[in-house]
Image (spheres, rainbow, N blue to C red):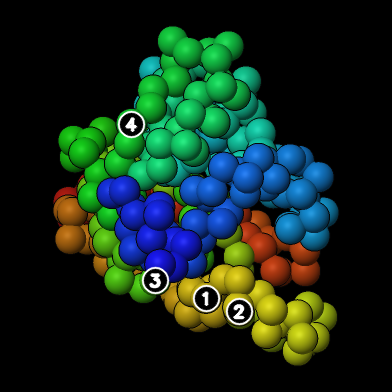
């Protein structure tokens, strides 16, 4: 029996097949949730990316924020420090939810956890003022990613925003990309990354919003990091009829 099949309990097939060792296996969870490991994986850019993300955090009173899936490191803890508002967190993995719950124990009254698949959220339409997605989309195959775009567009309110921290467009001039052995290695570890980097995220979000009666409010705000290897993108949302 293949090892990954031991982790199939209600999990998406791509998650257990390609990422069981990183997100579902207890020893993998212990290993990867060390700040030094996370920072190494991101080539020393974790703090920069975290700070660039927090700058765009919605801090208006009574805003409801959705962190779409749990994240290794101190993202959730930092969110709770930087806002007094509700933070909702969903993930398909019970182990990941338990880990993040421990990190947010000091603000348990403002932090709400649910086991959900990002492709099919149980939240009502227009539930959140901000949806935060931190290094999730590149780990999804295209069809799962499209479903997730649709769900993000559905649950975000007009007047709200979507905040995506991710890899940037294909970095053909970056020294890491030009180093072929590394490119082969990362494509092995991240089988959906190259397709994601070729994807027009703005267009995908724009189309998903349109299907939900919403649209972009101006151009996305994009900040790059590590010579355009990573990016932080804030997309402001409005009701489509506001254009008329």
Give residue 198's position: percent from left, percent from top: 50, 80
Give residue 210's position: percent from left, percent from top: 22, 61
Give the mark nearer the N terminus: 2 vs 4: 4
**Residue 125 position by quadrant:** top left
Give the mark nearer the N terminus: 1 vs 4: 4
Q: Residue at horizontal 73%, vertical 57%? A: 42
- Residue behind mark 2: 187
| Gap between marks 2 and 4 measured at Cα | 31 Å
Residue 159 at least partly seen: no
Give the mark nearer the N terminus: 3 vs 4: 4
- Residue behind mark 1: 191
| Gap between marks 3 and 4 measured at Cα | 23 Å
- Residue 137 lies left or right of residue 129; in this view the side is right
Q: Residue at horizontal 50%, vertical 57%? A: 20
Verify CB contact (< 8 Å) between mark 3 and mark 4: no
| Gap between marks 2 and 1 measured at Cα | 5 Å
Rendered-image quadrant of the C terminus: bottom left
């Amino acid at each position: 029996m293949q090892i990954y099949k031991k982790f199939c309990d209600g999990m998406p097939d791509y998650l257990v097949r390609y990422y069981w060792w990183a997100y579902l296996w207890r020893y993998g969870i212990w290993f990867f949730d060390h700040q030094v490991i996370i920072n190494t994986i991101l080539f020393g850019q974790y703090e920069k990316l975290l700070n660039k993300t927090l700058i765009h955090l919605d801090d208006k009173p009574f805003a409801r924020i959705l962190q779409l899936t749990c994240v290794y490191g101190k993202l959730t803890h930092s969110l709770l420090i930087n806002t007094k508002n509700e933070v909702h967190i969903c993930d398909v993995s019970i182990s990941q939810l338990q880990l993040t719950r421990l990190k947010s124990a000091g603000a348990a009254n403002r932090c709400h956890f649910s086991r959900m698949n990002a492709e099919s959220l149980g939240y009502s339409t227009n539930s959140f003022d901000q949806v935060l997605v931190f290094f999730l989309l590149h780990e999804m195959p295209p069809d799962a990613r499209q479903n997730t775009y649709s769900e993000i567009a559905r649950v975000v309110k007009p007047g709200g925003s979507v905040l995506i921290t991710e890899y940037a467009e294909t970095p053909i001039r970056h020294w890491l990309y030009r180093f072929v052995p590394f490119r082969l290695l990362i494509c092995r570890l991240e089988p959906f990354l190259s397709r994601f980097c070729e994807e027009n995220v703005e267009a995908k979000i724009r189309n998903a919003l349109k299907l939900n009666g919403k649209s972009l409010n101006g151009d996305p705000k994009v900040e790059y990091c590590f010579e355009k290897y990573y990016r932080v993108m804030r997309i402001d949302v409005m009701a489509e009829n506001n254009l008329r």
